[in-house]
Amino acid sequence: MRRFAASPYGVVVLIAVLVAALPAVLPTTFYVRIAALVFIFALAVVGLNLLMGFAGQVSLGHAGFFGIGAYAVAIGPTHLGIPSWAAFVIGVALAALIAFLVGRPILRLKGHYLAVATLGLGILIAMVMTNEAAWTGGPDGMPVPRLELFGWRVRGPVTWYWVSGITLVIGAWIAANLIASPTGRAFRAIHDSETAARVLGVDVARYKLLAFVLSAAYAAVAGAYLALFDGLVTPDSAGFLRSIEFVTMAVLGGLGSIFGSVVGAMILTVLPQVLTVFHDYEHIALGAIMIVFMIFLRAGIVPSLLTFLRRSS
């Protein structure tokens, strides 16, 4: 059972079972909405985990790509007359293209230099979305037309639960296949030592760029989903705090763990809702709980628990 839970494909099955079974225990549509948000954020974190957890590259500006996907489905139908589904595809392609063009120079950096460079990229994208008010609505944001597919209007928490849940399963399956492939082994080799990977014949620059582009595409899909789900998009979707939230979700759940991405997204989405009973002390309680998790589960929740189960057997 432990091997099944630790294997990439076992994790995909586990996520699929979770998505299929969860509606049976969710009492109201409010909880269904929260679950849909968990799946959307988890999708972005799965992509970020490919970059940070497997390829070992830091990104503090990933919300920029999230915002590109979100604004694409708003600007396309509103200003350009493009159907929402076409704007969605264009947004994901645009995020991947920008990641490709920008990633080539900045991925030559390492450590905190790379972190600062990606941070600057995210801030730049957020500034564009804030200042180009004629296109983006400025700081107040803009409404997002509902997604329509063949006359079917995608709306409501229940519908978006299944759309985001199924997409998360597909995204996890793609990530699992990638991890199990020679590309995934190249990612892990780069994570352990770029010099050793280069000596073994791994094209380090190419694989780092591939991880960066893939993670950007995941983030753009998640951003578009959130904008279409909420019916509104603001520059906060591409802001620095959103990037930090994604990184925190990845680290808290466990870097290098697909299911850890889901767990991290679930904790940082659900826990603030639970802690509202503390009113003014909500953020203090949230911070304290996160500190405790990091002290006692240093590798992240999922990897630490799996390690504990192995040692106890």
Image (cartoon, rainbow, N blue to C red):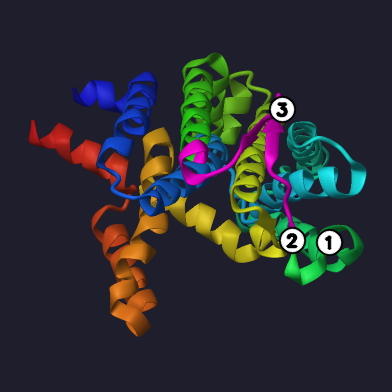
Q: Residue at x 35, y 76 (%)?
A: 282
Confirm whether the magenta stretch covers residue 153: yes
Single out the mark in the foreground, 1 or 3.
1
The disc, 3 or 2, on the residue closer to the chain's N-terminal end is 2
User: In which quadrant of the rendered view does residue 199 lie?
Assistant: top right
| Residue at the extreme top of the image, as rendered | 181
What residue would you read off at disc 1?
128
Q: Amino acid at mark 3?
A: Arg
Query: Residue 60 versus residue 109: which sits nearer the camera?
Result: 60
Q: Amino acid at mark 1?
A: Val
Q: Quadrant of the C terminus?
A: top left
Q: Amino acid at mark 2?
A: Gly
Horizontal and vertical percent for residue 126? 75, 61
Using the rendered image of the protein, determine whether residue 213 is visible from the camera's viewpoint.
no
Horizontal and vertical percent for residue 264? 39, 49
What residue would you read off at disc 3?
206
What residue would you read off at disc 2?
120
The disc, 1 or 3, on the residue closer to the chain's N-terminal end is 1
Single out the mark in the foreground, 2 or 1.
1
Magenta residues (range): 143-160
Q: What secondary structure is marked by label 2?
A: helix
Q: CA distance from mark 2 to mark 1?
A: 12 Å
Q: Residue at x 34, y 80 (%)?
A: 279
